[in-house]
Every structure is written in structure tokens, then in C-alpha cells.
Image (cartoon, helix red, strand yellow):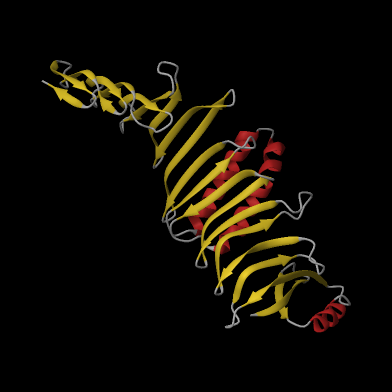
Amino acid sequence: MLQRLIYLVILLITTINLMAQVDSIDINNEKEFRELLKELRKNENLEVSIFRKTGKLDENDNPNGLWTTYVDINRTKKLYEGEYVSGKRDGEWRMFDLSDNHGKIKCKEQWIQDTLKKWTCYSDPGKKQYEIETQNYIPLESLSSIQYLGSISSNYSLAIGNYYEGQKEILDLIGIELKNTFGNRLKLSFWSFKERIDQERYFDEGIEFKRVTYEYKNKELYEKKTYEYGELISKESNTSKFIGTRKIIYFNVNGDTKTSGFIDESNQEKEGNWFEYYLNGKKKSMGFYLDNQKHGVWKYWDEKGKLITKEKYKRGVLKK
């Protein structure tokens, strides 16, 4: 197996009309590299950035095993690192922060056979900011725009004087970028500066079909709302009626309550009192769930509000 060092020189040529031309040169000989670099630095119109990429090649000259990209010749500042399997990126790849937090992970990527499946970026070391996930693939051409929006989100929020409004506007812009560039089903998650999940958005063929928002009080999740195609379909909120449960309400298309009850926080199963309603607002049924099974007396009404039947259950089994 061969060991090879590859030097990548990126040239940014700024012309009078402010257009930029970007070229790259691969060099496998250090002497050749240093001679070229010396010549390039004589040109005042060039801004030269050097990336040093190191790793191993297999018998077919494909990258294999751990590869690392550095932003300096002496290999002290990592930029990008991960594993190749027979020339294809696979598993977790890491992009490192080059600012004051140098050495800390800025973004993580999950690859399967050279297909990017998940992209997670951090506002501060260890603090998630946003994440894109898909069952298909994430087009690389869109990531630079999304990363830029994420990088300015905190400063933008401070500038307008309202953190949550600022974050919402930035997230809307990221959502627009996703609509314009992604042609498959994916999920976008966004965390607040307090490391709490703030929103989840789901896209399919460029259309946002689902959104979940989270609100907090006293450091605890207070309310969770789910929307489909812009319409509120459910709302969860804290409750003290049944220990370890949250109240949930499902809505009809007209905005009225369809069903309401309680769910176990640990497994999202039904627990406690549950009610179901007709479109006209009249009660349809009422009863109790124990461990996600009907338990005790259940009552059923017709659309005019007349009681039509009663049933008695014991842990999901109808008693006669």
C-alpha cells in the first residue's frame, strides 16, 4: 500500500470587475510544490491558500483508510478528516473550526458509500445548531450557503435585538435554500443557543409538508406543536393531572378539537382520560386508558349528543 501526500493550492484571482476565478493544482512532489509556491507569491494579484491532504492509497490508487486535510504546510491545523473505503467516503467525517475554537468540531457528516446522509453543525463546541438528514442524499452544492446562514445566525439575532425572531428568520432562509436545492425527502432540525431543540422541518420534493415547534418554560419543554402543510394538527403540553404524562390535542381541519387526552412521556402511549369529538363539536366518546389499553367504563354518543352505549373494559378486554 502506497503512502502519498497531495498538496492542493487554491488560487483566488480577483479582477477589476470583482469576479473571482478559482483554480486548483494537485502536486505530488514537495520540491515542485515549494518552487511553485515561491513563484505564485511574486504575483500581488493572487491570494494563495494551501491545503495539505494526507492519507493512504490502495493497490488501485484509490484513497483508503483515514485521510486528513490541513490548512498549513506543517500539518498543525486540521480542516477535514474521515475514512475512505476503496475510494468512497464512508462513516463519520469531521470539519474543524479554524477560529478561536480551533481543533473543535464545527460540523459532522455521515456518509454511506460516498453518499452524504446527515450533516450536523455546531454553534459552539459540542452545542448543536442545525442538522439535515435524509434517506436519499444531500447535494453538496447547497451546503456552503446553509453553513453561511448558520454561521451568521447568532450575530444577526443580536443585531435585530430579538434572539428568537432572528433565529426564526434565519431558519426560514435555510428552509428556502432547501426548497430550491433538494429534490428528495429530508428533515431539518434546529437547536437554540441553550442546546434545546427548537424546530424540526420535513421536506419532500422541495415542499415543506410537516413542521414541529418546541416551547420551553423554566428549562423544561412546555409545549410542542405539529403542523402539516401549514395547518395545526396537534398540540402537546405539560400537565400535572397524571404524573409522567403530557396532554395532547388533535385538531380537525376546521381547527376544532378532534381528540384529546394524555400520553406517557417515556413511550408516547395513551394514558389516562381520552375524549373524541364529532365535526360539529359534540362529544363522540369518553373513556380511560391504562398502559395504552382501554380500561374501565367507556361511553359513546351520536352526533346529536344522545348517549347510545356504554362498554366496560379491563386492560383492553371488553367485559360482558
The answer, for residue 282, to whether it is visible in the render is: no
Q: Nearer the viewer, residue 48 or 271?
A: 271
Assign the C terminus to one quadrant of the image. Answer: top left
The answer, for residue 123, to whether it is visible in the render is: yes
Compared to residue 54, the image places residue 109 above or below, namely above
Assign the N terminus to one quadrant of the image. Answer: bottom right
Place of residue 73 in the rendered image (x, y in percent of width and height, measured from the top left) = 81, 69
Question: What residue sits 43% from the left and 58% below the top?
Answer: 184
Question: What residue sits 50% from the left and 67% below the top?
Answer: 113
Q: Nearer the viewer, residue 104 or 229?
A: 104
Compared to residue 91, the image places residue 41 above or below, namely below
- Among all residues in the image, which is located at the extreme left? 320
Is 130 positioned to the left or the right of 33 in the image?
left
Residue 17 quadrant: bottom right
Place of residue 252 in the rendered image (x, y in percent of width and height, measured from the top left) = 30, 31
Place of residue 229 in the rendered image (x, y in percent of width and height, measured from the top left) = 39, 42
Q: How many marks?
A: 0
Q: Nearer the viewer, residue 188 or 31?
A: 31
Residue 318 quadrant: top left
Question: What residue sits 60% from the left and 82% below the top?
Answer: 61
Compared to residue 265, the image places residue 113 above or below, namely below
Place of residue 117 in the rendered image (x, y in percent of width and height, measured from the top left) = 50, 58
Q: Nearer the viewer, residue 208 or 241?
A: 241
Is 44 positioned to the left or the right of 103 in the image?
right
